[in-house]
Image (spheres, rainbow, N blue to C red):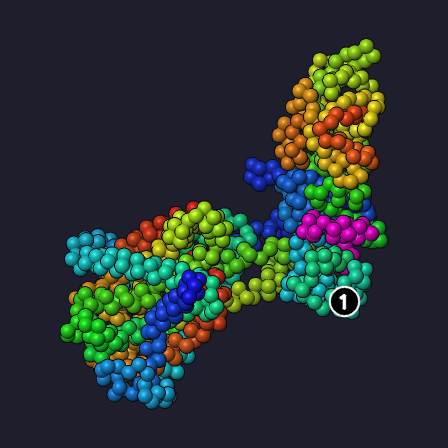
Amino acid sequence: MTRRRLNIVLLYAGVVLTCAILLFPIYWLVVTALSKPIDLRVLPPNFWPEVPQWQVFAKVLADRPLLLWLVNSTLAALGAVTLSMSVSIFAGYSLSRFRVRGGQSLGLFILTAKMLPATLLVIPLFGIFRSMGLVGSLWSVILAQATLIVPVTTWRLKGYVDTLPRELEQAAMVDGCSPLGALFRVILPVATPGLAATCLYGFVLSWSEYAYARTFLTSAQGNWTANLGLTTMKGEYVSDWNEISAAAIMVAIPVLLIYLFLERYLVSGLTAGAEK
Amino acid sequence: MAGIRIENVRKSFGVLEVLKGFSLDVADGEFVVLVGPSGCGKSTMLKILAGLDDATSGQILIGDREVTDVAPGERDVAMVFQNYALYPHLSVAKNMGFGLKMRGMARAEIDRRVREAARILDVEHLLDRRPKQLSGGQRQRVALGRAIVREPQAFLMDEPLSNLDAKLRVHMRAEIGALHKRLGVTTIYVTHDQIEAMTMADRIVIMRDGAIQQIADPDTMFQHPANLFVAGFIGSPGMNFMRSMVTMGASGPQLRLFGQDVPVDRPIAELAGKPVIVGLRPEHFAAGPGPVSFTVTPRLIESLGSEKYLYIEVPEENRGAITATRGGEDDHRGDSVIARIMDVGAIPQSEPITLSFDPSRLYLFDAETHVTIAG
Amino acid sequence: MSRLPLLDLARPSRRHWLGYLLLAPAVVLIALIIIYPLIVSFDISFQKVDIVRLDRRAPFNLVNYQQLLGSAEFWMACWVTLKMVVIVTACCVALGLGTALLVNNHFRGRTVARLLVALPWAVPEIIAVVIFAWIFDSSFGLMNWLFFRLGLINETINWFSDPNAAFVAVVVTMVWKGYPFVSIMALAGLQSIPEDYYNAARVDGANAWNRFTHITIPSLMPVLGVTMVLVLLWVFRDFSIINVMTGGGPLKATQTLSIMTYEHAFGFFKMGYASAVGVVTLIFCVLASLLMIGREADGIY
């Protein structure tokens, strides 16, 4: 084999091996979910169940209020994203287009706001929500998650609007729009891809959130989000790992799908905005 | 009825003065070109005219109506941008009709006007396409169409041809010219290309560093530039500049050029003993003997077929004319002048050639202020 | 359309008002849910309170800070945090950079490979905990079986009862969740290095290692710097992974400052003290952010 071919083969081998190792945990999750509970208490472990137990998903849905949890996560995400986007679209646009006094410092603050530890913020938020009677309601989670999402979406949207030429609004204004009209009739329609991507990113952030959900919702079982519900499935001594895994898969699927189909958009904003 | 009056408009960003007291009267139907190097303030002025920027002081009147602080949409002007600024999410037809729709015009009327404009600009077959499906030239025509349908009091054009390739630019130049003849709408056109200015303008406003250098029609500006900058900016290749002392000779004032004392029939006697800057256009050199002749070996000969550019080194005493022309088109002539000779056949390299010029073609500029003394 | 002259934001002289107007909702929201709570937490940290009350204020008291400075638990948490931050960040950077370099090559299916390599990023942290809690299960988990087979151990490691083992389990989970971010950023950085740099180096006779150390690494430094700080901050702040996996134990072996803050707030209901710990954590975070802002201001891309 020529040197070149050897390199290519090694490269492919390396890539396949790397992916296999790094993605193995996900594979293992699926295997665990599809195994019979008995088979999970046996060594050596099976690397693929003899008879995949596809019915585990239905069983989990029946045994646990998983559907309710998923609905709650969805509601919380929708609420948090809607709230966040409705302020950050305008803020991002303003930061991009206008030279606002204090805009620089606001931008800087937003950058740092992403780094605030939730474990600190959760304490005063608890006090605030308690006095407002919101503890146990999804609204507390929606507002709390907004603290995570608003900085991120504002920054991303600012970056995105930066890529749109100013002449677009200028043309619209000369054509007879007010500046606000230009924003709604021209900029927003043109920015739809960026808006959609940012919404989805906010959705991912909300869906994965746990700290606030756990603090504010533990007392209200009917409002548990999926992450919270999942942690309660882990027993003190014994757990039904196949069921937990199946539930975990169902919780992970929405964001995995979002990731797979929109990785390009998600990632481009990530690298432009440089945040996690 | 739709003339434009700009009265002493100033624009500063903090301490930076970008426009210094701009005043201009544009007659109805006139095609005025604002030209100058980048950073001279021409685009800023246009944006202020459009209402996209606010002036620090001054007044603007469009058709006798004061519009200094009026929204861009209410000024009844239409604008064409350098990068076309077509609305990507709308079809060509909707792009062109957008402004009319904003004004609440009836659908049928919008359609009629759009179709008419599309016909004039030959984009009828593109009406249902999206901007990203069009070529640069087509997009520019759609942008023009968007301006035309509004039937505004004035067109404002911000370097509309700069993004097109050379051939297309020449073609579109003619088209815009024809359009203006046909529609007769007052037009303010901004460009950095002096050729566009010369070929398209009724009057040219040449700017530098935020200040107007001269306002004149093309021929006048070419033949009677107000100062050194204008003289060097207009014309291609630009005017040659040399430094010379004024001396008094037997028959009157003289200038020392190319090793000779050249008598000049200009009233510069009081400048005797002082230096002046002398300008001579490349095309005013001739091959062979003439009123003032000299023999010289060209440093470099560029042949374009029927015309040839000869780079001639300037004698020591004539050097040092131009100091840092910021933004001016300094074409690395250095210590040479360019002579443009037409139809002269092959000129052997590295051999002396006789050239001549007529001293009445010389321009004289004040060595300090660069203002034209005589020309 | 006639508008009130004063409110007509389309006029050139008034247009910049719109900038402020558009910014207002965000500013108000941030003030309400971030700035105000922050102020409250600072306030509380100086009070000896059990539960946060907004209506009553306890007298100003430095006892919380005194207590934490003298507390062995606090210093232990600092040490644990430091260990975890350094190890996880280093591993994430190494793994992330490695995978980025790998998938930056040209080969068929590289788009798919890129997608797959960064997939753990999209997996919610809780799910990652589920996965690794099972893998590290002491009785039937994969890890113990693997170690057995590889001859590394003779008896089962009780991953979640042994302090050091628990630490390792948490670190592994964190690295798995954290490296994709570095990978994505590094890949973007790699792709923005002009091909010509490498071509010029090749012509000059540099081999692959030289090219790596003299072109790749220097060009990536800004991006890697920022990324490292972001990963660092993420580890610092993390709650989900540690809390669900080990709860900070066993014996506080995995209790970072962040976990300690939460524990004292909602485990022991000593919110004043917890806020003090939280404020200290915040100060570290801010210092680290300044590090990053400094780098970012130097102009990354």
Q: Is residue A234 magenta?
A: no
Name above or below for residue A60 compared with residue B301. below
Query: In the displayed structure, does residue A200 sit left or right of residue A25?
Result: right
Residue C70, by quadrant, is bottom left
User: Which residue lies at the image location 43% right of the left edge and 46% below the top edge?
Assistant: C298
What is the chain letter for disc 1?
B
Q: Is residue B174 magenta?
A: yes
Is residue B100 toward the left or the right of residue C282 in the image?
A: right
Residue type of the residue flagged with mark 1: His
Instruction: Label 1: state its secondary structure.
Output: helix
User: Can see residue B174?
Assistant: yes
| Residue lying furthest front | A1
Q: Quadrant of the N terminus of chain C?
A: bottom right
| Residue at 60% over, 65% down | A189
Q: Position of residue C222 (x, y in %)?
A: 41, 50
Position above or below: C220 against B39? below
Task: Point out residue A58 in the picture as x, y percentages from the top left corner.
Answer: 37, 88
Residue displayed at 40% across by 53% down:
C208
Structural crowding at the residue carrying mark 1, measured as other residues with C-alpha within 10 Å and reported as few (<14), some (14–19) or many (≥20): few
At 66% from the left and 47% from the top, the residue drawn is B47
Q: Which residues are magenta?
A: B149-178
Q: Which residue is mark 1?
A: B125
Q: Nearer the viewer, residue C19 or C140?
A: C140
Residue A121 locus on image (x, y percent): 33, 61
